Amino acid sequence: MAGTTMANRRIVMRKIRQVLRLALEQGMSKRAIAKSLGVSRDAVTDYVTRALAAGVNSPIPPELDDAYLERLLFPSDLGRQLRRPEPSWEVVHQDMKAKGATLQILHQEYLEAHPDGMGYSHYCGLYRQWQKTLKRYMRQPHTAGERAFVDYAGPTIAIHDMKTGEVRTAQIFVGILGASNYTYAEAHWSQKLPNWIAAHVRMFEFFGGAPQIVVCDNLKPAVTRASRTEPVIHSAYQHLAAHYSTVILPARPRQPKDKAKVENAVLIVERWILFRLRKRIFTSLAEANEAIAALLQDLNNRPFQKLAGCRRSQFETIDLPALQPLPAHAFEYTEFRRVRIGMDGLFEVDGTPYNTPFMLSGKVVDLRITPGTVEVLYQGQRAASHERKEGSTPVINALYLRPADRHFGQWSPDESLTWAAEVGAGVRAFIGKQLAASAIKEHGYRTTTALKKIHKMYGSERLDAACARANEIGASSLSSIRSILRTKLDQQVSSDSTHQEATFHHPNVRGPDYYH
């Protein structure tokens, strides 16, 4: 029984007991015993011979356990086994997590330390047998620093607003490293893209590095189209992966075993963190995260039941040295969208209109949105850029407007009054009345534009005289100005405001003597 594993050894010992019972107690023939138990006659003969030589009588005493019976029947085999030292399977298990590690290499190292040690097959069998004593999630092989698994917990945390009495629920984000089981958890308001991305950034900072692969579920902020072979990753999530030099690997649809590691981590977080916080009342998200961080530290420092150390010690020994270093500059959340520019040259981001160069009206463009800027990309090149703002007031860059639109956007009544004063006092008085009577900006702008066209046709002197004549007679329309200029009334001398006596005799003119 030298090359027999522990599981097979128990099976063999049960058959040996049956052989001895049938042979020594019931006196059955060796042929009948072999046929009944499915063993060879030579094996039956060997077992009975060994039992008689060891002094095992019928019936076998109940206190004679399998280990003692085996030592009686196979003393030489057990002696050889006892002389072969077994390695520390915990150390072997940890070494197998290193990149490139194989049982064959570890067995060679074992033989270098113990030349008379066990063979390779027996070595592998004992290691597999030891693995079965561990939990399932501990048996999965994971290379150091290779993978992190992320998901959301089902339960949420209630956040109470003491002023309004409103109760909001916070989502629980969970991340875990594959090799060491080092766990991260936090609370944020929703499972939307900005919170999803920000949670990854804080998780990488918590780990002190980035893994080579991030395994996620097919959530909307992570995957825009789920597929077993060709999933489509959200562009913003892909941008995060490029910044940290990692790869996003979505789990296959309806295959929870692909992310069994984080499924168990979520269960542990629910039991060791969320359940312990169930009676606490939180008034802010920061307060909830502070409580989660304290219990998370306790979870990562909790000793393993069947392995030496804890999650933190395993992390510092295995995962941390193998993680990729964090980038020199901090990640800036970037969201990509595709929109069609309106015929007015505007597009909206979260309810705020922005303008683009007028030649992009009606075109489909890509938007690169960060917390501080909004960029317009057309055919792979940046066509426009705005500072990101909130509200419904349009954000207009005058450089992107058509020349006429740009002039209207920059026009102000003070500009018109300054221009009119340079032309003449009559024009200044006329346009001042027009601007004062304008109900909207367009009216004043159109009046100024029309007067400037008239100024180009007739010049400053005639326009000023025409406006003065219009002011004198109380005319307030542009058509009156055009009429005065067309009939050249601006060139005629204006009548004096004082009355003059007639210098000729007429029957209807009484003269001043009539009133004396």
Image: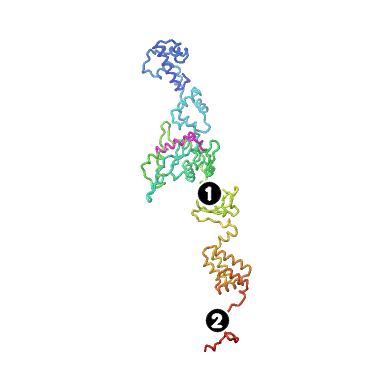
- Judging by the rendered image, the residue that carries numbered circle 2 is 498
Q: Earlier in the sequence, mark 2 or mark 1?
A: 1
- Type of amino acid at the residue the image marks with label 1: Ile
- Type of amino acid at the residue the image marks with label 2: Thr
Q: Residue 448, image x and y in percent? A: 57, 66
Nearest the camera: 389 or 5? Answer: 389
Q: Is residue 46 left or right of residue 475?
A: left
State the separation of the CA atoms marked 2 and 1. Answer: 73 Å
Q: Nearer the viewer, mark 2 or mark 1?
A: 2
Q: Which residues are magenta?
A: 250-272
Q: Residue 413, image x and y in percent? A: 54, 65
Nearest the camera: 264 or 293? Answer: 264
Task: Write the residue at 36% across / 16% down.
Answer: 61
Question: Eyeballing the image, is 425 above or below 117?
Answer: below
Which label is found at residue 369? 1
Residue 99 in view in this figure:
yes
Q: How many marks?
A: 2
Q: Residue 167, image x and y in percent? A: 39, 47
Q: Secondary structure at mark 2?
A: loop
Question: Eyeballing the image, is 323 above or below 409?
Answer: above
